[in-house]
Image (tube, grey):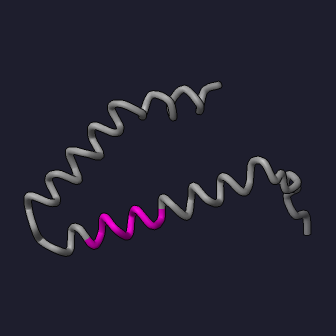
Amino acid sequence: MNLPLLSRFVLAHDIPRGLIHAVQSALELLFMLVAMTFQVGFIISVVVGLGVGETMFGRYAAYARFN
């Protein structure tokens, strides 16, 4: 049985990645709770805010993927 080799644990990369994942998961749960409130104005403001945030900062994530 051949197991794939994993890269070693790099503290400077893996700790921030784990923290970002935790924050992202918390935000996803909060957005789910917003949707469960059924308040259309609140849901629309969150969706618009996500769109504006992606417009302003999404290019940085796209740049980081290719460099």
Q: Is residue 28 above or below residue 20?
A: below
- Which one is in front, 35 or 1? 35
Quadrant hosting residue 38: bottom left
Q: Quadrant of the C terminus?
A: top right
Q: Is residue 51 left or right of residue 64?
A: left
Q: Is residue 27 magenta?
A: yes
Q: Is residue 28 left or right of residue 38?
A: right
* Percent position of residue 37, x then y: 16, 74
Q: Single out the residue that lies furthest toward the left.
A: 40
* Percent position of residue 48, x then y: 20, 44
Q: Is residue 65 left or right of residue 25?
A: right
* Percent position of residue 39, x then y: 10, 67
Q: Residue at x 16, y 59 (%)?
A: 43
Dominant secondary structure of the residues highlighted in magenta in the image: helix
Which stretch appears magenta? Answer: 25-33
Q: Residue at x 65, y 53 (%)?
A: 17
Q: Quadrant of the N terminus?
A: bottom right
- Which one is in front, 7 or 5? 7
Q: Is residue 45 magenta?
A: no
* Percent position of residue 18, x then y: 65, 60
Q: How many marks?
A: 0
Q: Residue at x 51, y 60 (%)?
A: 23
Q: Is residue 28 above or below residue 52?
A: below
Q: Residue at x 50, y 30 (%)?
A: 60
Quadrant hosting residue 42: bottom left
